Image (cartoon, grey):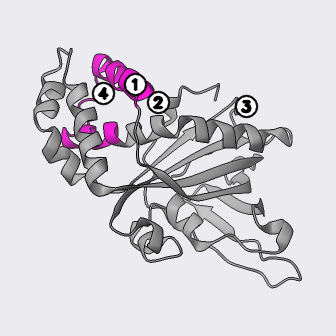
Amino acid sequence: MKKTNLFLAAVILSAGSYLSSCASTNEASTPSITTGSSVTRETIDWKGAVVNREPPVWVYDALASDYESLENGELAGKIKDKYYVVVSGSRVKKTDRDLKLLESSVAANYMVQIAQTLNNGVDQRFSGSLSTNEDTQKQLTATATEAKFTGFMKVGDYWLLQRVTDKKTDKTTENYTVVQVYACEKDLWQQQAAAYIQQLGLNTDSADLKKAGEMADEIAASLKPATSAAVYGDTDGVYFTAE
């Protein structure tokens, strides 16, 4: 896969099965994660490894879009009664600098990813017709790129280094993943979400986008927590997304 456009790379992760098993060692246990049927992920380093601290459960809940567990776990006090969004990014490790580059990319683009969750929410409301239309897709991309939001606080921030193996080809690569959780007061978020959706309905020939603009308050009120992920950098064709 060549360098991927942020919008094209953004995906809503399915609530896949992230299965963890911990071996008993003198160091922090290393969870082994399997995603889907063809890809195996083994966590080989993480943010707290140097101090012998295992990855918190919320990281895996967030990556698996397991919102029920996330809302009742370590971050419960920070996201309760708030709208929150999980944003993440992945990058193949080629040098030690890649983690810093990835963290900077996710931090710099988190508002774009938040806008992508809005785009996806609107698209789902119209049964996916917006993302399959080239003109509306361009407008969604352009609007997301310019999006600005206020009131979001970063309440979770973590990174993992995983060895990813394709079971069919045995190709293996080491990928960094950065996951962050941002939370905003619901009333403030719904106001901003409605304004964003209304903006989508302006200066467009798309009947669906115009209708979405008219339904902005209703759509904004119905939005659920979401997960958006993006691929950064040249992946050399060996990056495996969540299945």
Give the residue displayed 22% in from the left and 46% down from the top: 220
Q: Which mark is residue 74?
A: none
Q: Are marks 1 and 2 in contact (CB under 8 Å)?
A: yes
Question: Disc 4 versus disc 2: distance between alpha carbons?
Answer: 13 Å
Q: Which span is picked out in magenta?
A: 118-147
* Amino acid type at mark 3: Asp
Q: Earlier in the sequence, mark 4 or mark 2?
A: 2
Q: State the CA–CA distance, disc 1 to disc 4.
A: 13 Å
Q: Which residue is mark 2?
A: 7
Foreground: disc 1 or disc 4? 1
Along the line of sight, the residue nearer the viewer: 146 or 7 = 146
Task: Name the residue located 52 percent from the left edge and 30 percent from the top edge.
Answer: 6
Can you identify the residue that label 4 sits on?
132
In this rendering, position of residue 34 left or right of residue 208: right
Q: How far apart in space, not on screen, are marks 1 and 2 (Cα)?
A: 6 Å
Counting residues from the start of the chain, the first of labels 3 and 1 encountered is 1
Q: What's under tag 1, amino acid-wise?
A: Thr
Give the quarter of the image for residue 234. Answer: top right
Residue 185, picture quadrant: bottom left
Q: Which residue is mark 3?
A: 236
Q: What main secondary structure does the magenta stretch of the protein show? A: helix
Q: Earlier in the sequence, mark 1 or mark 4?
A: 4
